[in-house]
Amino acid sequence: MRILVTGTAGFIGAALAQRLLARGDVVHGFDNHNDYYDPALKEARLACFADHPNYTHQRADLADAAAVDQAFATFKPQRVVNLAAQAGVRYSLQNPHAYVQSNLVGFVNILEACRHGEVGHLVYASSSSVYGANRKLPFAVEDAVDHPLSLYAASKKANELMAHTYSHLYGLPTTGLRFFTVYGPWGRPDMSPMLFADRISRGEPIDVFNHGHHSRDFTYIDDIVEGVVRTLDHPAEPDPGYNPDRPTPGSSNAPYRLYNIGNDRPVQLMRFIELLEQQLGRSVEKRLLPMQPGDVADTWADVSALRRDVGYAPDTSIEDGVARFVAWYREYFGK
């Protein structure tokens, strides 16, 4: 297939592009290479596959409607995976306008291009952060998500609503994937696995928020990519069981779906740190601090819908995943 993937210099986008190319798809990448974190890491990811004969790359911003339209007009994608976004919960507290441009303006540009380009399926990144103040665990797509705790979370909820509108009005099949704490080789340096690994490797104290009581549904990158590919290959269809008298966020009479994509096995943050220390061969001081604004205490993905519909079955244990991450970290950074 001809697949347009946005965010191919990013963590998940780069891994997905390589998987699609390996199975014979033709991929057009779209990324603005911004400096939210070190662009050198983005360039290094891209270098792993940029010279593949079935890959083309466009450096442009999703908020630039003309650039998005040009990509669709020249490449003519059959399916689209939108992973480009301004990421990060804490950054949204200081830079809200960046999220409006990328996650709202950029996403409507993608929706319009998919509509006019007659794309067969749009898969887009949502986030576990949409569950916000919810305390019922595990999080299920049938749960209400009306209490976001950050603008980032609100922008992802908005993406889900915008996608539903296009599915309803124009019959565009859309599937939103709520990612849960993705980690692994080539991961983002602003996320806790990389931040902790850096400090542990230097023997520096690490800040542990919520006094170490966090738990996260850490999901290894290979399992995430497997789930994205399986979802991409199953275009959304109207739910025959949809009840307009008792609607839920996870179903619709339009070709629209939402799924959690996680490991379905939450891990205590202190256990994750312990595994990093074991692999790096060093223990460090933990500074236990209060919860940060915008954070949630626990995450746990109910992935039963994704298992049922596409056969999703994450199988990377936290022990194996951390070992692979640290092996890559040591090789890439020479530590």
Image (spheres, rainbow, N blue to C red):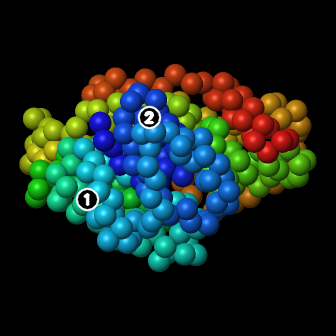
In this view, the residue in front, 25 or 286, is: 25
In the figure, is residue 251 to the left or right of 310?
left
Whether residue 252 is visible: no
Residue matched to label 2: 21
Image point 89% across, 49% down: which residue?
A: 202
Classify mark 1: residues with Cα within 10 Å, few (<14), some (14-19) or many (20+). few
**In the image as oriented, which residue stretches furthest toward the front?**
53
Q: In this view, does 156 lie above or below 183?
A: below
Dot 2 amino acid type: Leu
Looking at the image, which is closer to me, 44 or 63?
44
State the residue at coordinates (22%, 37%).
235
Image quarter where the N terminus lies is top left
Quarter of the image holding residue 207?
bottom right
Q: Can residue 334 be seen in this view?
A: yes
Q: Please name the amino acid that badge 1 sits on.
A: Ala
Up the image or down, 89 lies above or below 329; here it is: below
Question: So how many labels did they put on this image?
Answer: 2
Q: Mark 1 points at which residue?
A: 73
Chain-order first, disc 2 or disc 1: 2
Q: In this view, does 173 lie to the left or right of 278?
A: left
